[in-house]
Amino acid sequence: MPSFDILSKVDPQLLDNAVNITKKEVANRFDFKDAVVEIDFNKKDMKLALETSDDMKMRQLVEILINRANKQGISPHAFDMSKDSYQSGKTVKQDIVVKNGLKQEDAKKINKLIKDSGLKVQSQIMDDILRVTGKKIDDLQDVMQVCKTAELDLPLQFENMRS
């Protein structure tokens, strides 16, 4: 039976490239001249630690980082921006967590979306992956389209398409 996997992951190397490009761009920008700007990427925990001299520069830095990551093929939905920036002495800091892997509640939401679509496919949750199987490849492609058009705020990838 044809099947494929729905997952949500971010390649750490692509994100590291986006961080390095952001650092270069910030170093060349006039509005960041003589400003404290630090970007630390922890590959193990998939966290970004940003530090700038004021709140306006923090917003600009986050915008630059998301644009550069988007050009590297990383969805803006991959960044968890729920935590606001905070003052730390003379600088402003912000921690950004990169979403990696489908959480159980997100997998259940996608599973319910697939069931509600009425397509003749089966889906099962396997750790941080959702496997979808069906009799026809066309049904699986319809499931992909349903997941892409839904407002899930998740960076989804579709892999391991087997017929």
Image: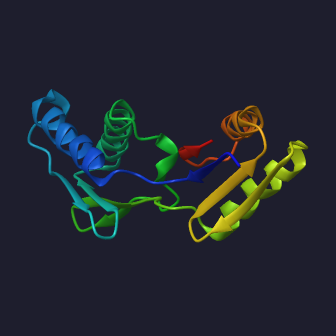
* Residue at 11 percent of width and 30 percent of height: 28
Q: Report x, y in % for residue 22.
A: 22, 39
* Residue at 68 percent of width and 38 percent of height: 144
Asked whether residue 156 appears in the rendered view, the answer is no
Q: Quadrant of the C terminus?
A: top right
As displayed, is residue 90 above or below residue 115?
A: below
Identify the image quadrant of residue 146.
top right
Total marks drawn?
0
As displayed, is residue 15 above or below residue 44?
A: above
As displayed, is residue 100 above or below residue 16?
A: below
* Residue at 32 percent of width and 41 percent of height: 65
Judge left or right: residue 29 versus residue 132: left
Name the foreground residue: 102 vs 46.
Answer: 102
Judge left or right: residue 125 versus residue 55: right
* Residue at 14 percent of width and 28 percent of height: 30
Identify the image quadrant of residue 64.
top left
Q: Report x, y in % for residue 159.
A: 52, 46
Judge left or right: residue 88 versus residue 73: left
Name the foreground residue: 2 vs 26.
Answer: 2
How are the residues colored?
Answer: rainbow
Asked whether residue 82 appears in the rendered view, the answer is yes
Identify the image quadrant of residue 145.
top right
Q: Report x, y in % for residue 92.
A: 29, 58
